[in-house]
Image (cartoon, coloured by chain):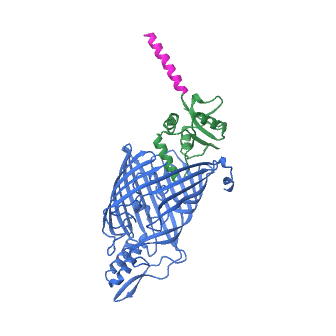
Chain colours: A blue, B green
Amino acid sequence: MLAALAMPAQAHDLTWSGFGTVGFAQSDQAYKYQRFIDDQGTFKRDSVIGAQVDLKFNQQWGAAVQAKLAPSDHSDSQWQGFLSWAFVSWRPNDDWLIRAGKIRLPMMLNTENSDVGATYDFARLPLEVYSIAPTTDVIGVSISKTWLGESFDWIAEAYTGEASTYWRYYGRDRTIDRNSPGSWFLPIDMKSSGLVLTARGFENTFRIGYHEGEASRPGTKTGAGFEKIPCGPSECYMLSAGGVDKLRVPIVTLGASVLLPGDFRLTGEYAKAKVESASRGLSRWGGYVALMKRMGAWTPYVSYAKTKSTDDALGVYQQINGNANTVPPPLRSGQTAMADITTPYDQSTLALGTSFWVTSKSVIKAELSRVRTGIASSFVDAPAGSDSGNRHINVFSLSYSFSF
Amino acid sequence: MKLRCLLFLLLSQIGQAGAAGDELVVIGHSGLPKTDKLTLQRLYTGRIVSIGTQAVVPVNLPAGVAVRDDFLQMIMEQNEEQYTGYWLVRRYVGKGSPPKELGSVDEVVKHVTTTPGAVGYVPLSKVPPGTNVIFKR
């Protein structure tokens, strides 16, 4: 690697490109959905700008760096610069590709290119599925082997790496340390390894993956559950002491995108994660199916997405949330905070949208979606004194994505 | 009638000669083996980086040049939009960048003949004598 980096400058082939999305989204509700969307409208949910530099040292060695500016992953009010990728690649022959550095993981079909709106037709990738992995970027190594076939290229990719990330929580009545509603971000160290098999043809793609994560909190234990303790005339749920140093987070991913007769494209993806912690609502599955049709520059689509935590997790949420109504009023916010920490998910989204390709590198997208929550949804920042269950949210999204 | 037939035949031959002169071929640096359409499709989509056992580096002409359009249509079986879109995704999934673009056919010829492992496409009429033609339809 050092030998490759030390090659004369004139032997390097450097290309750079930029990408971005200016996206506006507005709902018909006063409370926030997906951190930023409310009836005032926002550019923060979907807007991003970034640049990528690809460097070829020679026929085998290369490097890529991608940076972006987007809303912070540990603050709802700030923007942040991210180094999405920074890796060195070695391709000794046609079949093998080895990358080392900061890499984005091949979780769902569009995870790796999710920041580049000009690479897909959706106005917004279905969050029900694309949010399941605790992290999609790691510092580590990826090794892929390709078998070229007549109809499909088969690609097996194994990776391992680690990352520091944040899990966002929202307390509708109070946060963990403030007696007022708001979000807080828990720092998490993730180690992740996985194996992904992709069959990619010119028109069709299939992918299956198994990912094994390991989550820990810097300097403290995690994974503690809840315990009931007496509080006044009743009982309160509190985070129990103890916990473990590391939490196992296994994730299964499936995806397929198939071209049908008449230029229709059917895409479906599914993911399931298991997290044995107080935030047991993170143990959930998510899936979506989308049908789209390319008609010249237009690609209208309809999609349906759903995610749901395990029955056990939703049961714990309901128990604690219900308990909030039985405790004395001064203790209520503490109980709703405990309920919010369980991070429950039970929601579906029906979306109708279209993309309009201005050029092959720029696209305008519009989407109307209707979100329905069941027992609760942690994508919704519920109003104080209420909860996120049984809500309907209509969202209008309009964006322009480009690459150059 | 005979005169018309002769005239038609003569014009047909002239037409064929002209088409043959503009025929698209793929040239490679000396020593690169002959190849086929499927290999070229894989090479220009970054899915392979060699022909046989020899490492190769393809070069493109810029978008909008007629020779590139012919190459995409005849060899890649794609249009410009599809090819650009393919590389847009491939670049942003971290699997490499599209072949380097050179400004003209003359530059491609010069680059391929002087750069080990280089491969490019040019009209047959622009191929200098002695150049290694690795694919011809």
The number of callouts visible is: 0
Q: Where does the C terminus of chain B fall, quadrant-wise?
A: top right
Task: Confirm whether residue A136 shows in the render.
Answer: no
**Residue at the outermost top position:** B2
Q: Where does the N terminus of chain B fall, quadrant-wise?
A: top left
Q: Is residue A305 magenta?
A: no
- Residue A372: x and y in percent read 32, 64
Read off the magenta span.
B1-21
Looking at the image, residue B107 sits to the left or right of residue A390; the answer is right
- Residue A47: x and y in percent read 43, 57
- Residue B66: x and y in percent read 50, 34
Task: Confirm whether residue A324 shows in the render.
Answer: yes
- Residue B91: x and y in percent read 52, 50
Q: Is residue B12 magenta?
A: yes
Front position in the image: B30 or A63: A63
**Quadrant of the rendered image containing residue A306:** bottom left
Determine whether B44 is above or below A105 in the image. above
Front position in the image: A383 or B67: A383
Front position in the image: A258 or B16: B16
**Quadrant of the rendered image containing residue A296:** top left
Front position in the image: B128 or A161: B128
* Residue displayed at 35% across by 84% down: A330
The secondary structure that most of the magenta stretch takes on is helix
**Residue at the outermost bottom position:** A233
